[in-house]
Image: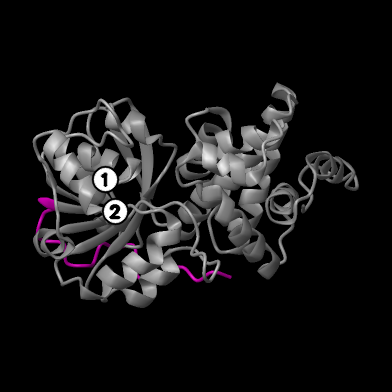
Amino acid sequence: MVDAPGGDDSGSIALERPIATVAVLGAGSWGTALAMLLARNGLTTLLWGRNPAELQQMAQQRCNHRFLPGLSFPEGLQIAPALDAALQQADLVLLAVPSHGFRELAEQVVPGLRPGQRLLWATKGLDLRSGQPLHTIITALCPKAVPYAVISGPTFAAEVARGLPTAVTVAATDAGYARMLAAAFSNDRFRVYTSSDIVGVELGGSVKNVLAIAAGIADGQGFGANTRAALVTRGLYEMMSLGLACGGLRETFMGLTGLGDLVLTCTDDQSRNRRFGLALGRGVAVAEARRQIDQVIEGIETTEAIHRLARHHHVEMPIVEQVYHVLFEGRELKTAVSSLFGRGLKAEDAPL
């Protein structure tokens, strides 16, 4: 079982100082979109990334042309050229980097956070070294006086940056902190629900990326709407089975960070994971499909991590298993499909 972080639901952590300044660490599409959202909400927002040349370009052009072309920064968004300066000013530190870079950044930033500062992450994926949810890294690093939370849900960065209506979930073990974050992020086009289920929220945001690759493969093969609907439904069952084994709550997987994010990522071509799967389904090799997407595809490495976590908890995940075989063992798609449909028949609600 993945241990949930300690704490209670009473809002007992001292949160007297309001959130006025946010340091968003990660200047990709998602980090930039969240920085734009927070700045529009009236918060002083400092956006930092690892590429100094790109940061300088964004500061001059007031836009992230690489990831969100044509969308101008609001006035309250500032580019932070130095990480230390951004952290020094921040009431809230938001980690918004891909999962493969999460541990390195957390180890660099989190231990030095001060009482009165808060921590939030928006990364979807698992720790690739341990195969565990990201909160396990934070729990080991975070000072006890610093509250932490995760924000996730069915979101495409470009739509958030454009101000299109969106709903997400923020999960924290401290209810007062969750409510504070919900208030900071919410506006008339962005609604935030609260939860105490950090484990469930993290796993939903991780497993859906793997299932989106599967959905893309199916559509790339021309299998049709029936297949896609079955894959989403049975994929949700796999997500829930692993999530419950790891200590998540069933209702979380039926919510925004489970079913909601799964439907979004499996059905819309804005998803890099789905587009990667589409390429595979049309006969493109794995390496070439990655090159064509030319952005981080979280589901690839997450497939290996989820496969490892499922084996650790003795949870069968047939769809995830076949994606793993295709990506990492070179299994032919025809063989993967035959393996799924050749399994023994059973009741729909039976264990996988």
Q: Position of residue 66 (x, y in %)?
A: 31, 36
Front one among 278 and 120? 278
Q: Position of residue 126 (x, y in %)?
A: 50, 60
**How is the structure coloured here?**
one colour
The kind of residue on which mark 1 rests is Ala
Q: Residue at 44% across / 63% down in the picture?
A: 134
Residue 276's disc number: none
Q: Circle 1 — which element?
A: helix
Q: Does residue 116 appear in this view?
A: yes
Reading the image, the residue beneath label 1 is 182
Q: Residue at 47% across / 30% down in the picture?
A: 270
The kind of residue on which mark 2 rests is Ala
Kindly indicate whether the residue at mark 2 contacts the one at mark 1 (C-beta within 8 angstroms).
yes
Reading the image, the residue beneath label 2 is 178
User: 138 above or below 347?
Assistant: below
Q: Circle 2 — which element?
A: helix
Q: What is the total number of numbered labels drawn onto the structure image?
A: 2
Q: Position of residue 242 (x, y in %)?
A: 63, 57
Front one among 45 and 231? 45
User: 119 above or below 61?
Assistant: below
* Magenta residues (range): 1-21
Dominant secondary structure (helix, strand or loop) of the stretch shown in magenta: loop
User: 23 above or below 276?
Assistant: below
